[in-house]
Amino acid sequence: MRTAFLRVWKNVARLEYWLIAQVTFGMLNFARLLPPRWALELGATLGQQLGPLSGRNKLVLENLRLAFPEKSEEERQAIAKRSWRNLFRLGAEYVFLEKLIDYDPDAPDSGLIEIEGVEIFKRLQEQNASCIFFTGHIGNFELLPICAAAYGLEITALFRPPNNPYVARRLLAARRTSMGHLVPSKAGAAWGLARALDEGKSVGMLVDQKFARGVLGTFFGQPVQTNPLLPKLARHYERPVHPARCIRLPGGRFRIILEEAIELPRNSEGVIDVPASTQMLNDVVERWVREHPDQWLWSHRRWHVNMNALRKAKSRR
């Protein structure tokens, strides 16, 4: 009986995913019929209007209360609306990703993208350097590896596919056309990144998502679990670690900000301290989010912590 129930439940969930995917694809196909500027603005407007009506908005507001207890409810709701605007616009931008990628290193002021830290890109290109880049879900984070490719930096990026398998397949296909090598964040992902570093290439990671088996730390003063893979790779390969992010500017423009490599904390033996380094990554992303809170992805369960891990951590104090 239980097996039959689970089978029916899975089929219902699969049908729900399929229906959501069809609505999503229909909206994106409609967007393709419009001029890019109109389509992107329409997506942003729909996000601002529809996002607050969704069931997920409750989680967005809960997350904002955890991060910004000092702000008023009106301020948090305003941030939530703008964050939905950012998220829906990001979805629409997948349709026009090729047209948005108009960055030309020989004419850096001619397109929609400007880069802060061009000298770092150029230096890494001249040195044919192998690096580790990290970022967060801020602005249009998809543009980062594409701009790096404009300077000859080949990046193998780790990404987490959406839970919806139908959307995940379409999204992966869209990313592959423009973003080079991608490694889904599942069992064996570490080997894909390690292989790239062994070959002298660079790797990139989003480091601001919940990771159930992650290192316990804090984010906005609240307990979180973070994937320790990046510090472990840096410890093993001794590669420089560069923070990078994308922020939105007025007029549909973007600014890519590449920072100099950070010095990860080391223990008394001179080896990279993984827990301390993981916390440093959290602190960097928190700084970014505080600067542009409406451009971060608030709709995921960043503060959902495995209680067993939390109890074990407290017992060790």
Image (spheres, rainbow, N blue to C red):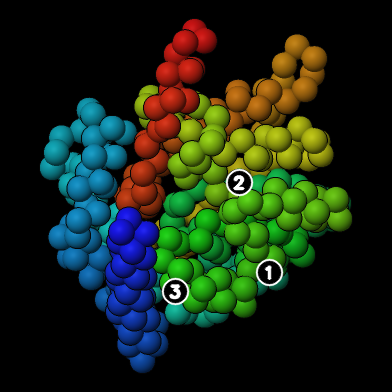
Can you identify the residue that label 2 sits on?
134
| Mark 2: secondary structure | strand
The mark nearer the N terminus, 2 or 1, is 2
Q: Residue 228 carries which label?
A: none
Local packing at callout 3 (Cα closer than 10 Å; few below 14, some 14-19, many 20+) is some
Can you identify the residue that label 1 sits on?
180
Give the side of residue 52 with respect to residue 201, left or right: left
Disc 2 and disc 1: Cα gap in Å? 16 Å
Q: Quadrant of residue 239?
A: top right
Q: Is residue 150 above or below residue 144?
A: below
Image coords of residue 72 (percent x, y)? 15, 35
Give the side of residue 127 with respect to residue 35, left or right: right
Mark 2 or mark 3, whichever is nearer to me = 3
Image coords of residue 199 (percent x, y)? 86, 55
Q: In this view, does 280 lie above or below 122?
A: above
Task: Confirm whether residue 115 shows in the render.
Answer: no
Q: Which mark is residue 166?
A: 3
Give the side of residue 146 with respect to residue 66, left or right: right
Disc 2 and disc 3: Cα gap in Å? 27 Å
The mark nearer the N terminus, 2 or 3, is 2
Q: Residue at x 61, y 46 (%)?
A: 134
The amino acid type found where label 1 is placed reads: Gly
Q: Quadrant of residue 242?
A: top right
